[in-house]
Amino acid sequence: MMQVNPVKSCNPVMKNSNANLRHVPSVDQLLRTDAARELRGLVGIRRLTNIARSVIAEIRALVRDGSIVTVGNGLLGEAVKRMEASARSEGQAGIKAVINATGVVLHTNLGRAPLSEAARAAIQDAARYCSVEYDLESGARGGRAARVESLLKDLSGAEDALVVNNCAAAALLILTMLARDGETIISRGELVEIGGDFRVPDVMASSGTRMIEVGTTNRTHLEDYRRAINSNTRLIMRVHPSNYRIVGFASSPEVSELSSLAHEAGLPLYEDAGSGQLSDLQKYGVNDEPVVREIVESGVDVVSFSGDKLLGSAQAGLIVGKHAIVARLRKHPLYRALRSDKLRLAALEATLLSHQREVADVEVPVIQMLALTADELEQRARSIVEKVNPTGALKLELQTGDRLSAAALDQPRPCRQP
């Protein structure tokens, strides 16, 4: 009978790696280093301990497979280096100020509209105790957004107004209240995706309404809407396509025509206006963006739009329209989950005041930037070139680009922190 003797491992790397494991520092050793004491103030002792544990586990794995051959204090130094890199990387994470050099004024990835000085001051003031739900004159409880709603009514010409935390929330609230368990008619050409995660069909489905598509991608006629109306219809909806455009052989009914049809059928008409233009900005090169007051005047019953785009304020979903509809929205249980906080309301109030006083072009940064002439932009560009290249060592030149269009107002592009 043949006897097989067990083969002993003779892999020198594995043997040395196992021997080197005893040189791996403990978590306690790592946390007693001078570097760890300095990092406590950056991430806190609890988080630093978790980082130290991860670093030691990582080093053990690397020593075990032979990727690290350093022993003794060298392993402690390697652990300190990795711990510092991880902790400081976390300290740099989060929201940071950046320079927007993309050429896109309302850049989604960069926070869209920068706030005016008045809006920033209002936020700082509201960060303390403030009269968010208190009427200073009567001494009784007041409406949470009474002043902002009053300004919105004045600027839009609507009967009533309401504020929620973003435009998707506004659409969800309106669709839930007006069309849940019923049908909502919408043109197939308006079933857009905006911002990478806002898809009109998804919001409609979440609200509990059944979406009824009419027309084709490029053309929808009034008769298409008329044929779709039945006893289950609760709402007709229009959606502004934002930075999506169909050009050429494309058409859709005028708002006034759709309003007449809706009212003949006893249905409300809702428009998601997107960017929320309070005054006509065509003179600044912004075309094809609806003006909220004109939408209201055309007979639309309820309109939603953004606070942090062309209005130039904080992120918010602004709703204006018929008092009977807005009052019902205010009483809906979903409204409490979607309502705005005091800081957003403070920024909105300050920005809306600039629009009401007709000084937005000099006080609101978005309007200021849109109002810049080509000559002013060229002068700014030359000034930047002079500052970054004072000795002329670099070869830099200016190139003329196209005037900003509405379609370029909200295009995410890669950017880097300076």
Image (spheres, helix red, strand yellow):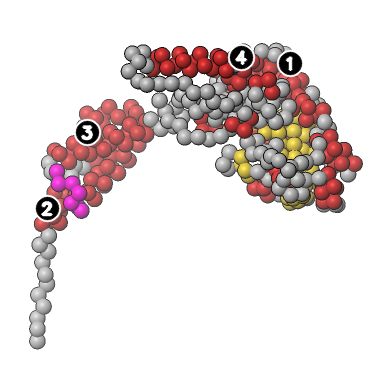
Instruction: Provide residue 274's location: percent of width, then percent of height.
Output: 67, 33
Instruction: Specify the quadrant of the image occupied by residue 367.
Output: top right
**Counting other residues with Cα less than 10 Å from the Cα at mark 3, is it few (<14), some (14-19), or many (20 or more)?**
few
**Counting other residues with Cα less than 10 Å from the Cα at mark 1, is it few (<14), some (14-19), or many (20 or more)?**
few
Does label 4 or label 2 sit earlier along the sequence? 2
Calculate the distance from the C-alpha at mark 3 to the C-alpha at mark 4.
53 Å
CB-based contact (under 8 Å), mark 4 and mark 1: no
Calculate the distance from the C-alpha at mark 3 to the C-alpha at mark 2.
28 Å
Residue visible at 50% across and 28% down in the picture: 102
Task: For mark 4, give the secondary structure.
Answer: helix
Going by the picture, which residue comes out furthest to the bottom? 1
Q: Which span of residues is magenta-colored?
A: 64-70
The reply to whether residue 324 is visible in this rendering is no
Q: Relative to the observer, which residue lies in front, 33 or 214? A: 214
**Counting other residues with Cα less than 10 Å from the Cα at mark 2, is it few (<14), some (14-19), or many (20 or more)?**
some
Residue occupied by mark 2: 16
Does label 4 or label 1 sit earlier along the sequence? 1
Amino acid type shown at disc 4: Glu
Residue occupied by mark 4: 363
Amino acid type shown at disc 1: Ser
Q: Relative to the observer, which residue lies in front, 218 or 242? A: 218
Residue occupied by mark 3: 32
Which dot marks residue 138? 1
